[in-house]
Image (cartoon, grey):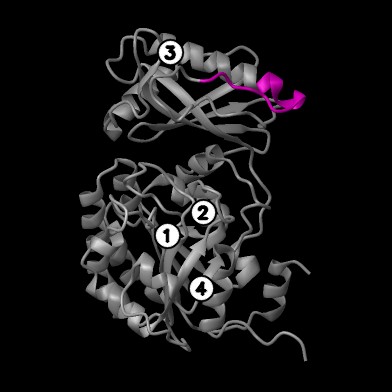
Amino acid sequence: MKPPDLIQELRDPNTTKIVFLVADGLGGLPLTPGGLTELETARTPNLDDLAREGVSGLSIPVLPGITPGSGPGHLALFGYDPLEHRIGRGVLEALGINFPLERRDVAARGNFCTLDAEGKIKDRRAGRPSDERNREICQKLKSVRVPGVELFIEPVSEHRFVVVFRGEGLSANIEDTDPQAVGVAPLPAVARDEDSRRTAEFADRFVAEARRVLHAEPDANGVTLRGFARYPNIATMQEVYGLRCACLAVYPMYKGLARLVGMDILDAGHSLDEQVETLERVWDQYDFFFIHFKYTDKTGEDGDFAAKVRRIEELDGIVPRITRLKPDVLIVTGDHSTPSVMRSHSWHPVPTLLWGRNVRTDGVSEFSEKTCLQGGLGQFEAKYLMTLAMAHAGRLGKYGA
């Protein structure tokens, strides 16, 4: 019996409420050996109170030593095995902007980048253009034509866009063209199998045409493509857990992840304050709430230790408004670690706390990497967090006689 089948067998109807407060890229590292991480440096009285009253641990998004992308990191938090459900970022970005994907489509996440005179990448994010500039640049790309396939180019935010290839016989088993490094040229789209060769050729042609169209742009004069994917078949959280689920996210990709697993995507504004205002307004309408906070990851990727500390403190400040709603279970965690000293995602386990009903407290008195290492949850695979949430919320029955 697979885990989702077991959960469907054991789940009990209930009126309890579960909140997942997900600080993207939460985990960190000290700037110098033996120093404090961003979370350990931040002043977090409210999270520390939750840690004292709850139970803590460190979650492993995929497997020990494996650095996850945001897609597998979040799927694991929602209880889906990220090794079984390999979903490309292109589909998630397309769903995040509510693009009407068809089953035959191949979607890819695009990044605008800055190329030097030799065609090497100077800035992988083209200086992070505004959303308005993003739309202007995407409008230019809409003139690109690739014989043999229909193209759709849609803006996402900042340097991100979506390109959708539509036609018959397309396949998505293709390597990224983003080398995720500067000082080197973008990579060709390499097909991993013969079925994907034709689609990879379309992708290379699109990249070349995009560069021609954008050659006069001061920053966004090139593109790279990541996460080629087709629409997957996946059970919804309603089907697996019997929960009415709401997504309160700002960034499109995370809305896409939530839409993929059947959550309702709510208009939650553009700030953490507005997200929690939405939570307060719809509290009686749902059983499960996913609140996504992007900026702990963004500051980590920017290598800005002090800014990540401030963002963690911002997150801490919103906690009392959530606890005043009296959730039966509140989980605070991240989808992966993004240490600012590394400027990237990492494989390090993620600080996690569970607060609410029926909790066996563990003596942890603050929320940090060091204390979570001593917590009662231990180190565990993130895909089990949903069953822990369901159990503490009184939504799982007994297994066996």
Report the span colored magenta.
187-199
Residue at image position (58%, 55%) is 62
Q: Which residue is mark 3?
A: 211
Rendered location of residue 51, percent (x, y): 35, 78
Q: Which residue is mark 1?
A: 334
Which element carries disc 2, helix, strand or loop? helix
| Residue 285 seen by the camera | no
Label 2 environment density (alpha carbons within 10 Å; few <14, some 14–19, many ≥20): many
Which numbered mark, 2 or 3, is in the foreground of this view? 2
Which element carries disc 3, helix, strand or loop? helix
Q: Amino acid at mark 3?
A: Arg
Q: Amino acid at mark 2?
A: Gly
Assign the C terminus to one quadrant of the image.
Answer: bottom right
Label 3 environment density (alpha carbons within 10 Å; few <14, some 14–19, many ≥20): some
The answer to whether the residue labelled 2 contacts the one labelled 1, judged by CB atoms less than 8 Å apart, is yes
Mark closest to the chain's N terminus, 4 or 1: 1
Which numbered mark, 4 or 1, is in the foreground of this view? 4
Mark closest to the chain's N terminus, 3 or 4: 3
Q: Amino acid at mark 1?
A: Gly
Left or right, 122 with reference to 374:
left
Which numbered mark, 3 or 4, is in the foreground of this view? 4
Left or right, 231 with reference to 163:
right
Determine the image quadrant of residue 382: bottom right
The answer to whether the residue labelled 1 contacts the one labelled 3, judged by CB atoms less than 8 Å apart, is no
Rendered location of residue 156, percent (x, y): 40, 36
In the picture, the disc for residue 73 is 2
The answer to whether the residue labelled 2 contacts the one labelled 3, judged by CB atoms less than 8 Å apart, is no
